[in-house]
Amino acid sequence: MNKKLTFLGIETSCDETAASIVRERENNTADVLSNVISSQIEEHKKFGGVVPELAARAHIDKIDFIIQEALDKSKTKIEDIDGIAATAGPGLIVCLTIGYNIGKSLAAFSGKPFLPINHLEGHALSPSIENKISFPYLLLLISGGHSQYLIIKGINDYEQIGTTIDDAVGEAFDKTAKILDLDYPGGPKVEKFAKLGNKNSYNLPKPIINRGGCNLSLAGLKTAVLRKSKEIDLDSDKEKYNLAASFQYTINKILVEKTKVAMKMFREKMSDQEPSKTFVVAGGVAANEIIRKDLIDLSKKMNFKPIFPSKEFCGDNAAMIAWAGIKRFKKKLLSNDIPVKSRWPLDKKAPFLKGPGLKL
Ligand code: KG4
Ligand code: ZN
């Protein structure tokens, strides 16, 4: 029997300081021996968003304790680790540098391999921590900074078939939360309010719903929420619930329509492959139960098997980074000289769909 690999993962790309010990299992899934996440929500709350320098300082203050806690909780010593993986991008450079440098130094001192990891690859592979999933699969990655449809053909083999041309889905939730005077990060709070409101209260726009393939556009929706918020009484909880519900269900309709298109594209592009029809949703917004429900219903209709990571692996975490490290190590994808970078698309050939004058 081959030795099962154990990796330390480190994640500091934004406002979570995280470390995790992950051990691979027999059936291509993994045991997460520890998954320590220290959130900086309190630090950033009063500014309504992440302040990079504050985030970097908090990472510096905490990262060594968080790594030690991850080792202690997993009852593992650094000598027992087979490799160290740290997020190298995309993200805030001042934040990425902290986790990357400590990971690289630890690896050098302990004589272990060091693997710089793409945060998006961490999200993309996160559902396979708990589920046996075969390639290719269709991925909807919805987080605070990214919203993409990708075909995951294998490790390091990713084709982007759609992306947002302006705001990410999580960003739209966070901005709506701000308009409704809800604390950062707003996604979970908007969802809570949406469950209490009437989704048919307001008719909000669904930009590029019938064109642009499975690309998304959400900036117009956010502007419409802002406009509506000025017409209603924001001191009334009921009106806030109704606007949150209308926003949430408009997002749902957009995601359902665009996922339908993405599923058809996946089928066409993968028609020569085994007809694996797995649809995976990952990233922070994948925790949203209202979105989960509609995408599960759609998957049934379209004959896809839907898979969502557990909520602890939806938001930013280091288990997904350690897991991507193990996967890359096994594939001998060992380049350790990738520098930290703020922009790092998973599919290098994908067009950059942002900016004025864009035609879809
Ligand atoms: O993946 P993630 O933790 O960080 C990034 O890589 O961006 O995603 C964070 C995003 C935030 O925008 C947050 O508001 C959103 O995920 N989010 C949610 C929910 N939980 C987190 N959005 C909607 N509903 C939720 N339940
Ligand atoms: Zn993320």
Image (cartoon, rainbow, N blue to C red):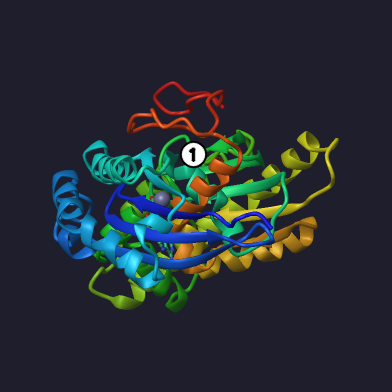
Q: Name the residue beneath numbered marker 1.
A: 164
Of residue 127 and residue 298, the one placed in the foreground of this image is 127
Rendered-image quarter of ligand 1: bottom left
Left-right relation of 336 to 256 = left
Q: Looking at numbered disc 1 in the image, what kind of residue is underneath it?
A: Thr
Question: Residue placed at 40% from the left, 69% from the top?
Answer: 74
Mark 1 packing: few (<14 Cα in 10 Å), some, or many (20+)? many
What percent of the width, then of the height, locates residue 339?
34, 29
**What percent of the width, then of the height, locates residue 146?**
44, 43
The kind of secondary structure element at disc 1 is loop
Q: Is residue 140 above or below residue 343?
A: below
Identify which residue, 326 or 149, lies in the foreground. 326
Q: Quadrant of residue 107?
A: top left
Could you tell me residue 119's position as x and y percent? 43, 44
Residue 314 visible, this angle: no
- Determine whether, in the image, residue 57 is placed left or right of residue 310: left
Quadrant of the snapshot with the N terminus: bottom right
- Residue nearest the viewer, comparing 145 with 220: 145
Q: Quadrant of the C terminus?
A: top right
- At 72% from the left and 46% from the top, the residue drawn is 135
For image coordinates 43% across by 55% down, the residue present is 81
Q: Is residue 163 visible?
A: yes
